Image (cartoon, rainbow, N blue to C red):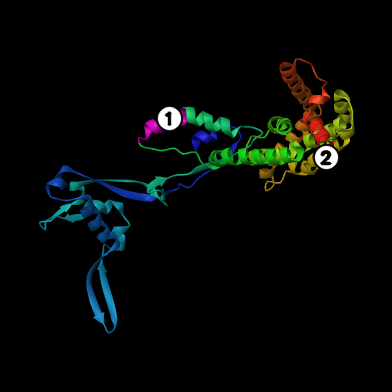
Amino acid sequence: MNRLRQFEGVYQIRSDFSPGKNEMRLSLKPEARTLGLTVNDLARQINAGYYGDEAVRIQRGRDDIRIKVRYTAKERSRLSDLSRVRIRTRTGHEVPLLSVANVHFSPGYSTITRTDGMRRVSVSADVNTKKANANEIIQELSEHYFQELKNRHQGIIIALQGEKKKMRESFGSLMIGFPLAIIGIYIIIATMFRSYVQPFVILFTIPFGIIGGIMAHFALGFNLSIMSIFGMVALAGVVVNDAIVLIERINENWAGGMSFFDALEHAGKRRFRAIFLTSISTIGGLAPLIFETDLQARFLIPMALSIAGGVLFATVLTLVLIPSLMVILNDLRRACYRFKYGLWPERVSVEPSLMRNRQEEY
C-alpha cells in the first residue's frame, strides 16, 4: 500500500487485511524437547490458566453445572506473571514456562481470508485518469515491485484482479463472440445485396470506426476499459449503416444508366445529408453521457466514447473510403476481364449489380 501511495493520481487505497490484537507466540527451547513437551502442550496449559479449564461437574436437579478453574483477574491482566506460569510435564513434574520456551508478542490477524485453501490479501485502489494511467501503474509494479516482493517472501503468488482481470476475461469471450457477430453482419449484407464482394467493402469501415473510438479516448483523457471494448463491439453494427446506404444508392445509379464515376458522385451528394444527420443525431444523443460528471454514470462514459468517436471518424471516411474502394474493385474486375478476353471493358459493364439486373430483366 505504501508503494501505491507513491504514484500520483492513486487514491482510496484499501485492503482487506487489518492487524488484530497482539498474540503470544511460543518457540520451544531444547529443554522442552528433552522433557517431551510440544507447542500444543504449552498452548493448552496456558489457555487453561487464562481462560479456564473444567475441573468438576455438579448435577443440581436437571441442571449440569460446570466449574472451571483459572488464574485470578489480577494475574491474568499482567504479562509479567508469565514468568511465574508453571508447565506440567508428562511425568507430572512442573517447570517454569520461560525455562522451556521463548515468549514474544506480535500483532495477529483480525480476519483471515482464504481462496482455494490459501491465505489471500486483497489490495485495491482508484485511479484519477486525468493524472495517471492504470495500465502504466500496473506495468511499473509488474516489472519492478512484484519481483522484489516475490524475492522477499518465497512462495507468494500475485494475481491481478479488478479491471485488469475483467478485461482479460472479456477479451477471451470476445475472441469468440466478435467474429461470429461479423459473420452474421456479412451474411445479412450479402443476402441483401446478393453479392459476395460488396459486403467486404462495407465491413472495411469497422476497423476505422474502432480507430476513431480509441482516438476519442485519448482525446478526452480516458483509459481503455472493459466498457470501451463493449462499445466497440456495438460500434461494429452501427458504422456499417452509412456504408450500406451509400452503396445501395450507387447500385441504383448504375442500374439507372449512369456512368461509373457519375454514379459515385451522385450517390455521395444525395446520401450525404442522410449519413450526416444520422451520425450527428447518434453523437448528439451520447454527448450528455460523455460529459456527465456524476460518479455513478462515469463507468458508462468509455462505452459512449467508443460509439461516438467511432461513428464520427467512420462517417467522414465512409464518404471518401467507400467510393475509393469501389474504384479499386472495379479496376480489379476490369483487369480480370482483360486477362480473360484480351479487351478492356467499360467500367459499369463488369459490375455484378448491373449484370444481375440485366439478367433479371431478360
How many residues crowd mark 1 within 10 Å: few (<14), some (14–19), many (20+)?
Answer: few
Q: Are marks 2 and 1 in contact (CB under 8 Å)?
A: no
Q: Position of residue 294 (x, y in %)?
A: 71, 46
Horizontal side of residue 86 vs 17, given as left or right: left
- 145 inside magenta stretch: yes
Say which amino acid is labelled 1: Gln
What's the residue at 55%, 31% (across, down)? 137
Horizontal side of residue 50 vs 210, given as left or right: left
Which residue is under mark 2? 278
Q: Nearer the viewer, residue 332 or 87?
A: 332
Q: Nearer the viewer, residue 82 or 279?
A: 279
> What whole-number distance in Å separates the C-alpha atoms at marks 2 and 1?
52 Å
Looking at the image, the residue that sits furthest to the bottom is: 61
Query: Magenta span covers which residues?
Result: 144-154
Report if residue 6 is visible in the image: no
Which residue is under mark 1? 147
Say which amino acid is labelled 2: Thr
Corner quadrant of residue 257: top right
- 331 inside magenta stretch: no
Q: Position of residue 144 (x, y in %)?
A: 47, 27
Between tags 2 and 1, which lies in front? 2
Mark 2 and mark 1 lie on one chain; the one further toward the N terminus is 1
Query: Circle 1 — which element?
Result: helix
Q: Position of residue 330 (x, y in %)?
A: 77, 23
